[in-house]
Amino acid sequence: MRKSTLLLIILLILSSVFAFSPRLFQLDKLFNFAKGKLVCESGSQFQSDTKGINLPTEKNIVINPSGTINYLKEDFSRYSNNSKVISEFDDLDNLELTGLFSDKKLSSETYSGSHSLSLQTLPSSETSRSLTVKKQLSQPLDLGKWNDFGILSMWMKIADRKGITGVGLKIGDKDNNYREYQEIKNLQVNITNNFDTKDVYPDIELPSKKVNPSMWTDYWLNKGWNYLFWRADKDHYADNGILDIKNITWVEITINENANLAKQEILLDDLRIQDGIEKENNSLGGMWYPPDKKPQNGIFELDNLSNGAYAAKLLNVRQTQYLTNGDHGRMVLNYGTPINFAMKTRFRLTDLPKNNKERVNTWFRVAYDFDYIYDPGHDWFGSFISFEWNKLGLTTIIPIEKDNIQDWEPRNKNISGTSTDFIPRENVLYELDLTAREQQATASIYEVGDNCLTLKAHTDYTFQRPRRGSDERYHFALEVTGNLKAYIYNVEIKEL
């Protein structure tokens, strides 16, 4: 029998099998889902599942009357005016230090920027003093939009919280007029921080009044990386002179300390200003926001890339600073999930876990039907990349007791039925395609090359847990945990 005839017979047999398959896979998908298969973008899962569907060319978002997404094409470029980087601390030029510093240098250890500024402090014997870092900017910055509005933020790593009583911030112009923002307090007491409203640690009220309580409960700085923020609205700063807010030429960070300050390395990283860090005002225009509408549950920063594109950087507030967060950073889309959809997102992952201890509970997740109100993070369907298991998989999390007890489908012992081996690499561009048709879900992950995709892993599953009704269409969400950081380049969703 000729090879061509044999191949035709095989194709006919496979075609008849898949014609009756409950997964409804087209025959061409059989070949595209071969691991290591190189396909052009037209052969990806997303493109195959949306084939024959007209995608809007003039609108990047179309919302159904029910509030669910009909179509979304998100590349984050429309949010370019919502934030601005003031200093990434990626050079030592025009830097002036005052106080007990023994050394300064650039560090490759960062939390958000390309480098951080490493400062080596000396022990203090005085009751109260300060360490200041004054940075002359390479060019003047126009911060006029945020004259009485927004949030300034920075990441700071410390080895010991003892002796650091607070952190101040000033911005100034060429004539040395300046604005001084209210100091961030780091209460020095030997009392356990229980992260509730009944102890002595300060609660920082957030600008929005639409969340109750509208505050960061029990703010402090702790060992490790910390998220610092200063409110830029009225009554939260004082001016010295008439500041030219449209021509800011320098910034000054003051670390206030007492006699208990130990010799240690302090890292400063990525000082920026943005519209806000809640839902109503944030760097992504409120289209994406953190669960409970509070920054403790997810930080995302917009980066302007060298090629003119943008990326939303998804970070988490560390558990050492805010215990109840659990080292989860999430960004929730402001519209509901349709019952049938195809979705793709392109991203890079950095700061991958380096040992087995760090791998535990380290995930990247793409969720749908995500409950952002009652028990955020503990009620959703979706796809995951697990560094603990080295898997790409599908799951649903089911809340049993709010915040404390969850069930999941499938259980861990059965996870192999919905997952497949996959080990992501540092800083590689990936595309994750996720399709849901009622109870059925399919996930594929590709490594992105020059106009072509290489399939790295694929899995599918039919959930037994019912999806939500048409009147309860919860949202899409992206999530990182642990040290993991994600650069999200684009998200595209189409209702099927």
Image (cartoon, helix red, strand yellow):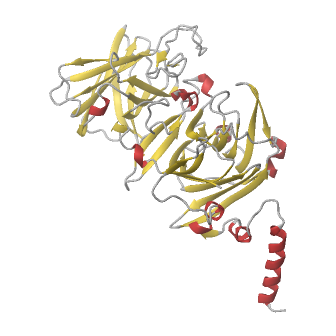
Above/below status of 462 relative to 401? below
Q: Nearer the viewer, residue 100 or 300?
A: 300
- Say which residue appears at 59% left-offset and 12% top-offset: 192
Q: Position of residue 248 (x, y in %)?
A: 23, 32
- Say which residue appears at 45% left-offset and 18% top-offset: 262
Q: Nearer the viewer, residue 179 or 473?
A: 473
Q: Position of residue 344 (x, y in %)?
A: 59, 54
Say whether residue 420 is left or right of residue 247.
right
Say whether residue 453 is left or right of residue 233.
right
Name, please, the residue furthest toward the front.
65
Q: Is residue 88 visible?
A: no
Q: Nearer the viewer, residue 309 or 137?
A: 309
Q: Position of residue 265 (x, y in %)?
A: 43, 28
Q: Position of residue 282 (x, y in %)?
A: 44, 34
- Say which residue appears at 79% left-offset and 41% top-offset: 466
- Say which residue appears at 41% left-offset and 43% top-offset: 79
Name, please, the residue furthest toward the bottom.
2
Q: Is residue 174 visible?
A: yes
Above/below status of 113 relative to 193? below
Above/below status of 17 relative to 133? below
Q: Quadrant of residue 379?
A: top right
Quadrant of the frame with the N terminus: bottom right
